[in-house]
Image: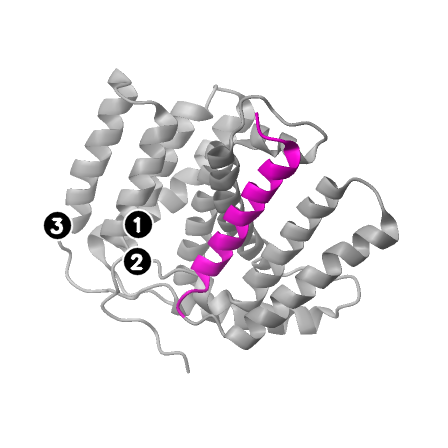
Amino acid sequence: MCSRAVLILWFGGGFVLEALYLVRRNPKWSQLMGLGGFAVVAGPVVYLVRGGDPAIHAAVWLGLLGLVVAMAYQDQILPVVSDKLLLGFTLIFWYGLATGFYRGTSMQRLLLYASALPSAASLYVAVMRPPLGFWSKLALYAWYLVIVVSLGLLQFPFGNLAIFGGRSPGWLGPIDAFTTGLVAMYLLASAFYLYLLIPVPGRSQSFSDRMEEWHEFTQLMTRRCSDEDGPADGQAFAILAVLGACLLLNYVFALLPSPLVISLAIIAAAVLLERPPARLAPDG
């Protein structure tokens, strides 16, 4: 069994590697080195001043590093979301709810009702391909982030975080800790962007300043939502027939473990459906 410190190092390595992967297109090395230098210096200083459990400080340090990277590299980390990608992720979302979440409680039924409208809108946009305005794109992009965060919470192995709580779980190995770090960074960035959509000012921030930031962020987000309006095509029906059928068959016959199927479906959707869009809104 690996020591707790070794597992934390593996987790941190996965976390940092995922951050580097997300900013790979234009890392802005001077900015990235500045963030890294600050993190390397700030972590030990806080520990020396405040003391306490080094593992807790490591968790806080990684969390702050992830938030800073997500904030500084919004234009790179925010993915381009097409209608076909959104449809694929919507199917995976419903499969995840059916297999790993839904137990029939009143709160869960309310969640299903609330998810029905954006899901229907995703299907309509993918099939009919209507022209989309600012608010339509923003709503669809927000729905995409909700799906990513929801699937992440359903899939995320929270038990692996026990390494930061004072013990080294016997079931956890280096690869588990490393992959958990990879997922944690992406999930943190997605949850942070979803939080930024809430136009609530900070403690010392005026509402007008917060709304100005909100408009800048939402403009960036809607530019990352591909605008592929045109005649209806058969791609959406192909996604429903292939991906939908595979998920339905596994739900009925349980051929593979549901977490594995969700992971494979996410990878397949990202590889096959996240193609460069036909047209993006201009940056200016």
Question: Which range is magenta?
Answer: 1-25
The answer to which of marks 3 and 1 sits earlier in the sequence is 3
* Viewport quadrant of the C terminus: bottom left
Q: Position of residue 233 (x, y in %)?
A: 13, 54
Q: CA distance from mark 2 to mark 1?
A: 11 Å
Q: Position of residue 120 (x, y in %)?
A: 33, 44
Query: Which mark is in front, 2 or 3?
Result: 2
Secondary structure at badge 1 equals helix
Is residue 215 visible in this depiction of the protein? no
Q: Which residue is found at the position 28% from the left and 65% from the top?
A: 131
Q: Position of residue 154 (x, y in %)?
A: 48, 32
Secondary structure at badge 3 equals loop
- Disc 1: CA contacts within 10 A as few (<14), some (14-19) or many (>=20): some
Q: Which residue is found at the position 86% from the left and 50% from the top?
A: 50
Say if the magenta span includes residue 148. Answer: no
Q: Hey, what amino acid is under mark 2? A: Ser
| Marking on residue 270 | 1
